[in-house]
Amino acid sequence: MTTHETTLLLPSMSLVRYPGAVWTLALMLFLLLIVMPVTLLLAPWQQNVAGQGKVSAIHPSDRQQAVDSPVDGRVLRWHVVEGTKVNQGDPVVDVTDIDPAFLSRIVEERQNIIRRIDAARARELSLGERIEGLDGSRRNSLDANRSRIETASDRVQAAEKALTAAEATLVADRLNLDRQKKLIEKGLTSTRNVELAQMAYDRALAEVERSRAAVNAEKNSKFVLLADQEKITTDFKASIEDAKASRAAALTEIANANIELQRVDARLARQESQTVRAPRDGTIFRLLAQPGSEVLKAGDPVALLVPEATQVVVELWMNGNDAPLITPGRVVRLQFEGWPAIQFVGWPSVAVGTFGGKVLLVDSTDNGEGKFRVLVVPDPDDEPWPSSRWLRQGVRTNGWVLLNEVKLGFELWRQFNGFPPTVAITEPGKAPSGGKK
């Protein structure tokens, strides 16, 4: 095209008019490009921290657990297969002991212990009766000896009275003899009277000596009876204490035998409980032993059971930088694996397919890799979580713990500068410097 032709074309184009709609559309696009960024920068944005985890149970007893073998042996027969739903007490597997005669030997040992207990109880009963008999004999012997002592005391008193009378007679005869001797010196009495007085004095003296001997004899007899009473008490006490010691030994033997019996009963119960039963309602997840070939020890797991959780919970693992921002009661948005969802992190109100939760607790220490576990329970004010058919234990979950609401422009500025989310200046419950909260 020549220069002249170009000069003629430009004035022609300047004469062309555009429709008004084109100008309106161009103006709207221009305004949209100017207003939308400003609007977005001023739009509200929900700050959050993200974590990943899985569905679990809030109670440890509701989480996956092993069904253990109670005895040493081999698997004889399975009553379930993987995926079987069982109720508490349903048979899971039969375990047979390696030694088929072991159970009969335990039963025989139990019978021997029972016979020992019976013999010890009979001996203890016999010793108890012997103690009662010895105690009765001791009382009777002491009563009889007390009677003899009382009789001896009476005889001592009688002998002492006889001695007193003999001594009084002796005094009278001595006075009579002295008087007769004085009278004969004066010639007032005969020799015969003096001799009679002398004879009476000698008899009285002999009677006094005899009475004294009788008193001493009765006192000695009473002393012997008192010594016999002490001997009876000592002898019977020794016999009773010996019987009590033998009885205590029998009771000790009974107690030891009962302890052995309890141990044998425990072993027997374990051997007799060779049918392993489900500890609670749930589903058999894995079978861990082969019938007949694998030798089990007591306590070895034979199957894995996933209980029917009464209350599910989500375990989220959060970064250590985000853990201080999370406190119990924080709102959480959850996206479960296998559940269709459209998530808008900054605008949770427009998210679809996510579910609400609340932070129950945050572990006080990490898992050794800098991750902190956060337990999330369903939010009672939000839509209920899916049923256990969809929300099984172990389902992977993405979670976003919601923090403060800020402007989108501030959030972009924070992200570009690598600043943390907005948090309180001081720790909860502490006032900043100056005493003002």
Image (cartoon, rainbow, N blue to C red):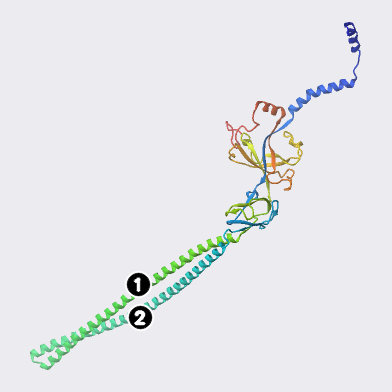
Of 284 and 425, nearer the camera is 284
Of 26 and 86, nearer the camera is 86
Where does label 2 land, which residue? 147
User: Percent x, y for residue 218?
Assistant: 27, 81
Q: Amino acid at mark 1?
A: Thr
**Distance between mark 1 and mark 2 Cα atoms:** 19 Å
Give above or below for 306 relative to 111.
above
Query: Residue 234 shows which numbered tag?
Result: 1
Query: Which of disc 2 and disc 1 is earlier in sequence?
Result: 2
Examine the rendering and report whether any part of residue 93 can be seen: no
Of 102 and 229, nearer the camera is 102
Examine the rendering and report whether any part of residue 389 can be seen: yes
User: Percent x, y for residue 217?
Assistant: 25, 81
Left or right placement of residue 150 versus residue 194 in this view: right
For image coordinates 88% across by 21% down, the residue present is 22
User: Percent x, y for residue 272?
Assistant: 60, 61
Count of all numbered marks drawn on residues in the image? 2
For image coordinates 86% across by 23% down, the residue present is 25
Q: Residue furthest front?
A: 293
User: What kind of element bears circle 2?
Assistant: helix
Give above or below for 239 relative to 52.
below
Of 319 and 412, nearer the camera is 319
Q: Amino acid at mark 2?
A: Ser
User: What kind of element bears circle 1?
Assistant: helix
Left or right placement of residue 14 versus residue 315 in this view: right
Query: The C terminus lies in which quarter of the figure?
Result: top right
Give above or below for 22 relative to 76.
above
Q: Residue furthest top?
A: 4
Give above or below for 236 relative to 166.
above
User: Percent x, y for residue 282?
Assistant: 68, 52
Quarter location, residue 15? top right
Tell us which disc is closer to us: 1 or 2: 1
